[in-house]
Image: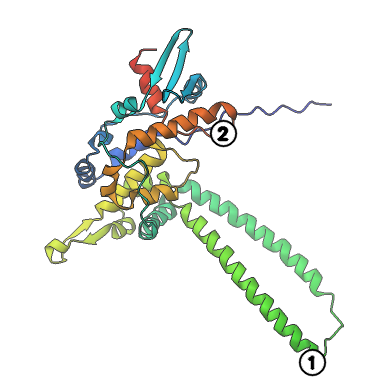
């Protein structure tokens, strides 16, 4: 009798992906680059980061330890030799505008969500080959399940019910079933609404943003990114630069500075990029450092858990010290 092969637990994949940000920078239109410069985030455009070695990342996280009393992160290189990371080290790493807000902006996201969804859903439908194949497989599976369900219903319809309710009882029964049906419809609508939002949210991904910019001259994409310029009596058309820059910062937040656990853009990220001017007021070194500290503190407890935090800070710190 053959022994079953033991399943090996893989280390957690990190959503941290600086390479996706670097690739996106190369696709930005000149006007979008200028907008980022005007917001005082020019340093982001000069980043030349590739995706990190996962084993090295895990090694650094294993060696890292948070010292709450001194508010530092220690990376033990070898016996007697450690690197100490502080909030100042984070600021030196990115050199962002010196904001004071300790939390991300939380502006309403409805308009941002809708505008991003419109263009990214087109990008996904036309250019996301992987998603197309997944949808085709899901459709085939659904057809098979519907066929099985039809067979079950056909068998059930062959058994006729012989009992009939009398008129008065029937009326009461109808009223009750109407009321139950009403509640059921309400519950179904609520459930359907949540599913619809989840499906729409799944379209808001860094990959679809990348596909949008790669195919920015495609007619279907372009007509959703173009708006009339009020300064030229409405005849001249320009790209909606704010929308493009929101997309850029959304990926920067979700894949570099404050990596999330989901493949799609988080609600917190959408709120943060709604008002672009407010990004300058954020104390980024504080947020990044606190997020990294939490990740370091949690990492040793569960090796299968996703690694969060901007591990680029750890990488830069170790490289600076030539270890």
**Residue at 27% of width from left, 52% of height from top?**
242
The image quadrant of residue 153 is bottom right
Q: Nearer the viewer, residue 192 or 27?
A: 192
- Judging depth in this view, the residue of 2 and 50 nearest the camera is 50
| Residue 150: percent from left, percent from top | 72, 67
Report the residue marked by disc 2: 305
Query: Which color scheme does this rendered protein use?
Result: rainbow
User: Is 257 in front, or is 293?
Assistant: 293
In the shown orientation, is residue 149 left or right of residue 56?
right
Residue named by callout 1: 167
- CB contact under 8 Å: marks 1 and 2: no
**Residue at 37%, 29% in the rendered image:** 50
The quarter of the image holding the N terminus is top right
In the image, taking residue 64 as reference, residue 270 lies left or right, namely left
**Looking at the rendering, which quadrant does residue 316 occupy?**
top left
| Rendered location of residue 24, percent (x, y) | 33, 40
Percent of width and height locating residue 15:
47, 36
Q: Earlier in the sequence, mark 1 or mark 2?
A: 1
Q: For the residue carrying disc 1, how many other residues have a C-alpha within 10 Å: few (<14), some (14-19), or many (20+)?
A: few
Residue projecting furthest to the left: 232
Task: Please say whether residue 60 is visible from this viewpoint.
Answer: yes
Residue at point 52%, 33% (across, down): 13
Q: Nearer the viewer, residue 229 or 172?
A: 172
Query: SS class of the residue under badge 1?
Result: helix
């Amino acid at each position: 009798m053959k022994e079953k092969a033991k399943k090996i637990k893989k280390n957690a994949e990190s959503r941290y992906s600086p390479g996706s940000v670097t690739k996106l920078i190369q696709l930005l239109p000149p006007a979008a680059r200028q907008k980022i410069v005007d917001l005082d985030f020019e340093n982001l455009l000069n980043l030349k980061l590739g995706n990190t070695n996962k084993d090295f990342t895990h090694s650094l996280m294993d060696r890292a330890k948070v010292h709450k009393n001194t508010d530092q992160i220690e990376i033990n290189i070898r016996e007697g030799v450690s690197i100490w990371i502080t909030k100042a080290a984070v600021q030196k790493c990115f050199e962002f505008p010196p904001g004071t807000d300790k939390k991300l902006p939380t502006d309403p996201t409805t308009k941002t969500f809708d505008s991003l969804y419109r263009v990214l859903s087109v990008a996904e439908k036309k250019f996301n080959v992987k998603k197309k194949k997944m949808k085709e497989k899901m459709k085939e599976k659904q057809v098979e399940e519907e066929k099985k369900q039809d067979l079950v219903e056909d068998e059930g319809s062959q058994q006729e019910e012989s009992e009939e309710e009398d008129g008065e009882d029937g009326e009461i029964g109808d009223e009750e079933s109407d009321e139950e049906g009403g509640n059921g419809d309400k519950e179904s609508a609520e459930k359907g609404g949540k599913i619809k939002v989840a499906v729409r949210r799944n379209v808001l991904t860094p990959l679809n943003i990348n596909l949008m910019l790669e195919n920015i001259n495609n007619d279907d994409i372009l007509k959703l990114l173009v708006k009339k310029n009020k300064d030229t009596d409405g005849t001249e058309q320009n790209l909606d630069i704010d929308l493009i820059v929101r997309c850029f910062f959304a990926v920067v937040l979700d894949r570099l500075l404050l990596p999330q656990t989901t493949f799609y853009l988080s609600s917190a990220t959408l709120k943060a990029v709604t008002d672009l001017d407010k990004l300058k007021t954020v104390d980024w070194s504080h947020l990044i450092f606190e997020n990294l500290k939490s990740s370091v503190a949690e990492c040793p407890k569960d090796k299968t858990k996703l690694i969060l935090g901007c591990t680029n800070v750890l990488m830069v710190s170790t490289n600076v010290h030539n270890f």
